[in-house]
Image: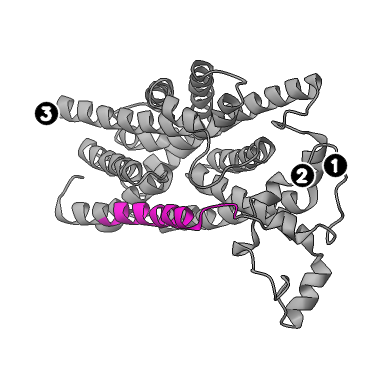
């Protein structure tokens, strides 16, 4: 019976890792495949290698947090299987709705629900994790907002990535960057996600940390070589259609943030940070139509920044803000750019974004609630 339960647990862990590989490969290497820099098989191979490296290095700290830090008791095999089922169920729900759920947040929610049900939740560690869940997206937004406001137009003018107007040397540099940053994203995805697949089994002492990393890495590779081919075809998604340069900036900022959190043992969502990076970059770029002093003066006077006779841009963020810069074009100083160049269309679909945010909140909440209900009524420890 125990052997059968362990096989079920391993099967669910593989299912979780398989889905992580399928979704993360598209996020990491979509720009590289979409620009014909590498093929799908090459992208899958790089994803497999760098995700394993990420799991072997920074991922160990996240495994330790999720297996021993959130609750003050050891997992049993039955409890581990139950937690993994909650994570797998969240992946199924997210796939049905067509949006990426945060497996990290869902897994933490399930473990926290168990700890609360049995009175063994480590409130100090949970407080630290939840604090970073709020801080990380805010950091991602503001870092990219500052890049969008002060650096992006100069970068777009100097490095015409993906515009068809770059020189051979610039094109080769761009190809190198898009692959290198894809590898960095794969490393970050492995660092933050291997724990989601195997931490409960490691916490139950059914797998060593080393074997857990290899199991999760293999499952991620399986997903990368199979279902990821479809996500690589899509390249973008419902949320946005970013230029190549903007995509690379978003990937560097979000991957750096999640890699840092992984090294300090905090399970966090790469998708959440990436989305807030996208919104921040577009918002910062769109704010170049006014100076800070002008905005402050109008705010004090109770005036809007936009001309009152004009329709205001949705959230002040424009997709055209990231597409308006032309290679070699002289960049207008802040406050002198034309508003009609920067607010033609939204950076993101508000309804799609609202659906994603709703599921980001709902899936860990449902996971925690269901886990609490289960462990309150059934003794699996």
Whether residue 115 is visible to the viewer of this picture, yes or no, is no
Judging by the rendered image, the residue that carries numbered circle 1 is: 329
Q: CA distance from mark 2 to mark 3?
A: 64 Å
How far is the residue under mark 2 from the one under mark 1? Answer: 7 Å
Badge 2 or badge 3: first in the primary sequence: 3
**Near-viewer residue (348 or 345):** 345
Please rate how many residues cluster around mark 3, counting C-alpha atoms within 10 Å: few if below 14, some from 14 to 19, many from 20: few
Circle 2 — which element?
loop
Image point 74% across, 54% down: which residue? 341
Badge 2: residue crowd in 10 Å (few <14, some 14–19, many ≥20): some
From the viewer's perspective, is the residue at label 1 or at label 3 nearer?
1
x and y, in percent, of residue 288 in the image: 77, 58
Magenta stretch bounds: 346-369
Closer-to-camera residue (2/139): 139
What colour scheme has been applied to the protein in the rendered image? one colour
**Identity of the residue drawn at 49% across and 16% down:** 41
**From what the image shows, is residue 60 above or below residue 98?**
above
Q: Is-magenta flag for residue 354?
A: yes
Give the residue pinned by disc 3. 1
Please tell me which of labels 1 and 3 falls first in the chain.
3
Number of residue marks = 3
What's the mark number on residue 135?
Answer: none
Dominant SS in magenta: helix
Q: Is residue 267 above or below residue 291?
A: above
**Marks 1/3: CA distance?**
69 Å
């Amino acid at each position: 019976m125990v052997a059968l339960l362990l096989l079920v647990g391993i099967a669910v862990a593989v299912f979780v890792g398989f889905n992580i590989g399928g979704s993360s490969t598209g996020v990491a290497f979509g720009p590289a495949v979409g620009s014909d820099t590498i093929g799908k098989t090459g992208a899958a191979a790089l994803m497999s290698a760098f995700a394993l490296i990420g799991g072997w290095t920074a991922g160990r700290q996240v495994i330790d947090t999720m297996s021993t830090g959130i609750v003050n008791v050891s997992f049993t095999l039955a409890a581990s299987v139950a937690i993994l089922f909650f994570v797998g169920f969240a992946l199924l729900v997210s796939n049905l709705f067509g949006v990426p759920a945060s497996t990290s947040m869902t897994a933490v929610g399930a473990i926290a629900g168990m700890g609360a049900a049995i009175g063994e939740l480590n409130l100090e560690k949970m407080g630290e994790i939840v604090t970073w869940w709020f801080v990380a997206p805010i950091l991602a937004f503001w870092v990219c907002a500052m890049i969008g406001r002060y650096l992006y137009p100069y970068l777009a003018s100097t490095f015409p990535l993906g515009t068809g107007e770059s020189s051979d040397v610039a094109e080769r540099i761009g190809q190198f960057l898009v692959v290198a940053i894809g590898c960095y994203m794969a490393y970050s995805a492995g660092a933050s996600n291997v724990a989601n697949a195997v931490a409960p089994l490691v916490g139950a002492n059914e797998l060593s940390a080393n074997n857990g990393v290899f199991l999760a890495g293999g499952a991620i590779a399986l997903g990368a070589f199979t279902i990821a081919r479809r996500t690589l075809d899509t390249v973008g998604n419902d949320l946005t259609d970013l230029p190549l340069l903007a995509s690379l900036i978003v990937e560097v900022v979000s991957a750096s943030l999640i890699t840092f959190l992984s090294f300090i043992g905090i399970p966090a969502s790469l998708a959440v940070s990436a989305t807030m990076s996208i919104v921040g970059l577009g918002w910062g770029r769109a704010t170049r139509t006014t100076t800070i002093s002008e905005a402050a003066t109008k705010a004090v006077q109770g005036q809007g920044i936009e001309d009152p006779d004009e329709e205001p841009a949705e959230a002040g963020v424009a997709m055209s803000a990231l597409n308006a810069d032309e290679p070699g074009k002289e960049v207008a100083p802040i406050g002198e750019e034309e508003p009609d160049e920067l607010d033609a269309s939204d950076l993101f679909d508000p309804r799609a974004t609202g659906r994603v945010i709703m599921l980001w909140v709902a899936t860990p909440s449902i996971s925690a609630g269901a886990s609490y209900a289960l462990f309150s009524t059934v003794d699996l420890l």
